[in-house]
Amino acid sequence: MLRFLVLISLVCLISSEPEEECLTFTKLNFHNAVVGTDLKVRLLLYTRENATCAKALESPFPESFNLTRKTTFIIHGFRPTGSPPVWLPELVEGLLRMEDMNVLVVDWNRGATHIIYSTAFRHTRQVAKILAETIDQMLANGASLDNIYMIGVSLGAHIAGFVGQMYDGKIGRITGLDPAGPLFNGKPPNERLDHTDAQFVDVIHSDTDFFGFKETLGNIDFYPNGGLDQPGCPQTILGGFDYFKCDHQRSVFLYLSSLEEGCDITAYPCESYSDYLNGKCISCGDGQPGPCPHLGYHADQWKNYSLLKDPPVTKAFFDTADEKPFCIYHYFVDIMTWNKNTRKGYITIKLTDQAGNTTESKISHEPATFQKYQQVSLLARFAQDVDQVKGISLVFSTGPVIWSKYKLRIIWLKLRPITRPEKPQMCRYDIVLTENKETAFQPILC
Ligand SMILES: *[C@@H]1O[C@H](CO)[C@@H](O)[C@H](O)[C@H]1NC(C)=O
Ligand SMILES: *[C@@H]1O[C@H](CO)[C@@H](O)[C@H](O)[C@H]1NC(C)=O
Ligand SMILES: *[C@@H]1O[C@H](CO)[C@@H](O)[C@H](O)[C@H]1NC(C)=O
Ligand SMILES: *[C@@H]1O[C@H](CO)[C@@H](O)[C@H](O)[C@H]1NC(C)=O
């Protein structure tokens, strides 16, 4: 009897469906990085069917790999510690929330994990070749190059570029997240990512002075906070390992915030960061021929405008807050003054809503020049926004001397929301600011 029961349960064990296992990203450790790893590329397929459980993408392709949908490749970079990228699950799930697509995580952790960067660098062409084999097979099964999107991080951005090159730039889109700089800086376009590698190439540069690439690489290149140092990242080695990777990784976190609700990062096409800070970049948005570009997933809405330029390359600047969700809110403050003498100075602006919440901005980098009857447009950047502006207060200052008492006579002032252009513009006429003294007033609808 007992023997019979054992037999029954054995049969049950054998005949029961083997539990479908989820494929996970290769986990390695620092020991692997020291010893070094040989290249091995695995493709992890995620779909809306189960956004947290990957299937291996092997030939023949699994049924869930629907080639009429968009396919997004995520390609990581150098892995000096061997650990899986921390941002990976959030990126996969965020993309699947945005659109019903195939997400293919390109796991080349074996090959990227090494304490020596140049070893990982040497594997990039080979990873690209392996990806092209998969893409060829996808095309043979009815996929279209238009529907292929590659998101490459650091070294991964150049891998995406190499793949794009093999298809003469006919791939739909490549997003480069802080494309790697070392061993790529100064290289000709065919040895790195560039704007001819896809129909549309957008790039975020967040660490141009260390791990990132300095020059423009795409149709639109976004430079958060000027592209060098990111707010909230440690400025010294005392910050530990984060000191090395925080600026670089910020590009990924900025992209991630574009997959969330409620924080649209708007950027401003501009020649330089200082021009942006000085409010000189007003060629988009309200009253202009085109909208301002948005960073991240929806950057391709700007494709048509970027391709109008010759060469089709645009730099765009913006500031961010120091933590998630990173967006800051831009307003233009247009001011017309009637002082007899020209005044140079800075203006600080504070906005208040009905509930008494306030938000403060320091505007303009260089002192603004106020001349009689000439309009000055200042760019004000706020870490928080208020819903309805009920009060504005201004402080004018000409420099570090706090007892100086110049006056600024304002004929009119207009507050124009640009991050949220649907909000009403607010105006105020006839105000006199005394230097270093806060002047508060209620604006009216313009
Ligand atoms: C996704 O897969 C995981 C692991 O197999 C499982 O626990 C989870 O229930 C699945 N979710 C759905 C929606 O099928
Ligand atoms: C594949 O995706 C397309 C577009 O989302 C859909 O219309 C079609 O039904 C899907 N095919 C299968 C077999 O699921
Ligand atoms: C971009 O241009 C194409 C072709 O000219 C047009 O079909 C499409 O509607 C345009 N898209 C936007 C967002 O303007
Ligand atoms: C404004 O203040 C109220 C009350 O303190 C608070 O509940 C609300 O979240 C604040 N709104 C904003 C936009 O900060």
Image: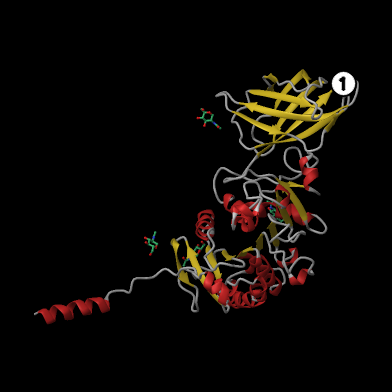
Instruction: Pick the residue in front: 142 or 224.
Output: 224
| Left/right of residue 377 with respect to residue 234 in the rendered view | right
Q: How many marks?
A: 1
- Report if the beta carbon of the residue with label 1 is closer than 8 angstroms to ligand 4: no
Seen as rendered, the residue at the extreme right is 341
| Left/right of residue 123 with respect to residue 270 in the rendered view | left
Horizontal and vertical percent position of residue 423: 64, 32
- Identify which amino acid the numbered label 1 is placed on: Asn
Which quarter of the picture shows residue 292? top right
Instruction: Pick the residue in front: 203 or 31.
Output: 31
Indicate whether 129 appears above or below 302: below
Q: Residues within 10 Å of mark 1 (few under 14, many from 20)?
A: some
Q: Is residue 235 visible?
A: yes
Q: Which residue is the site of mark 1?
A: 339
Indicate whether 283 appears above or below 57: above
Indicate whether 293 appears above or below 145: above
Ligand 1 appears in which quadrant? bottom left
Horizontal and vertical percent position of residue 281: 79, 42
Residue shown at the point (57%, 74%) measured from the top left: 34
| Left/right of residue 342 with respect to residue 319 in the rendered view | right
Q: Is residue 446 visible?
A: no
Query: Which quadrant does the C terminus fall into?
Result: top right
